[in-house]
């Protein structure tokens, strides 16, 4: 759910219903904005949000169990592209210097380790999917 600042008072009246149905609405998440058209277009294009905890582990949803493997692979490539774009200039080298280990898992499932060098091929698949 995306909301404009001018409508937040109307949304606040039904806040308990919205929280039970949707995730939080707020500027940090990008769902409460003054630029509504830009936020909607970014969401439709598949905006990626990832979080980095204090131990430098990146948490990001890649998709659902119902997704086809090709779609999950393209999502992994899009995440890799976003990570490379967010890489600090201080870190020299490509993906192997920046990413040490990749593990993919479901919410409560076992993790499966992925070879970091295979992420470059996933980035190409993401470009082809767009």
Image (spheres, rainbow, N blue to C red):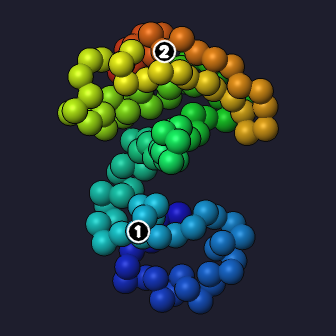
> What residue is shown with label 1?
27
Counting from the top left corner in percent of width and height, residue 17 is at 69, 77
Secondary structure found at label 1:
loop
Counting from the top left corner in percent of width and height, residue 88 is at 26, 36
- Residue 15, compared with residue 29, is above or below; it is below
- Residue 126, compared with residue 42, is above or below; it is above
| Residue depicted at x 55% and y 86% | 12
Q: Residues within 10 Å of mark 2 (few under 14, many from 20)?
A: some
Horizontal side of 92 relative to 28 (left or right) equals left
- Residue 130, compared with residue 63, is above or below; it is above
Q: Residues within 10 Å of mark 1 (few under 14, many from 20)?
A: few
**Residue sticking out furthest to the left:** 89
Counting from the top left corner in percent of width and height, residue 5 is at 37, 79
- Residue 127, compared with residue 29, is above or below; it is above
> What residue is shown with label 2?
116
| Residue depicted at x 43% and y 64% | 28
63 vs 38, nearest the viewer: 63
48 vs 52, nearest the viewer: 52
Which-is-in-front pick, marks 1 and 2? 2
| Residue depicted at x 32% and y 29% | 84
Horizontal side of 112 relative to 56 (left or right) equals right
Counting from the top left corner in percent of width and height, residue 83 is at 38, 33
Q: In the figure, residue 91 lies in which quadrant?
A: top left
Residue 63 shows up from this direction: yes
Q: Quadrant of the C terminus?
A: top left
Secondary structure found at label 2:
helix
Q: In the figure, residue 90 lies in which quadrant?
A: top left
Residue 129 shows up from this direction: no
Q: CA distance from mark 1 to mark 2?
A: 33 Å
Mark count = 2
Mark carried by residue 103: none
Q: Earlier in the sequence, mark 1 or mark 2?
A: 1
């Amino acid at each position: 759910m995306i909301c404009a600042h001018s409508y937040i008072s109307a949304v606040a009246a039904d806040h308990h219903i919205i929280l039970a149905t949707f995730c939080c609405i707020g500027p940090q998440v990008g769902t409460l904005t003054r630029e509504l058209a830009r936020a909607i277009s970014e969401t439709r294009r598949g905006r990626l949000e990832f979080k980095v905890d204090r131990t430098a582990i990146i948490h990001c949803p890649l998709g659902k169990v119902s997704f086809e493997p090709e779609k999950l692979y393209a999502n992994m490539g899009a995440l890799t592209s976003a990570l490379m774009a967010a890489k600090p200039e201080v870190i020299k080298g490509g993906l192997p210097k920046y990413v040490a280990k990749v593990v993919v898992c479901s919410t409560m499932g076992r993790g499966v380790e992925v070879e970091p060098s295979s992420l470059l091929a996933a980035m190409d698949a993401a470009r082809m999917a767009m």
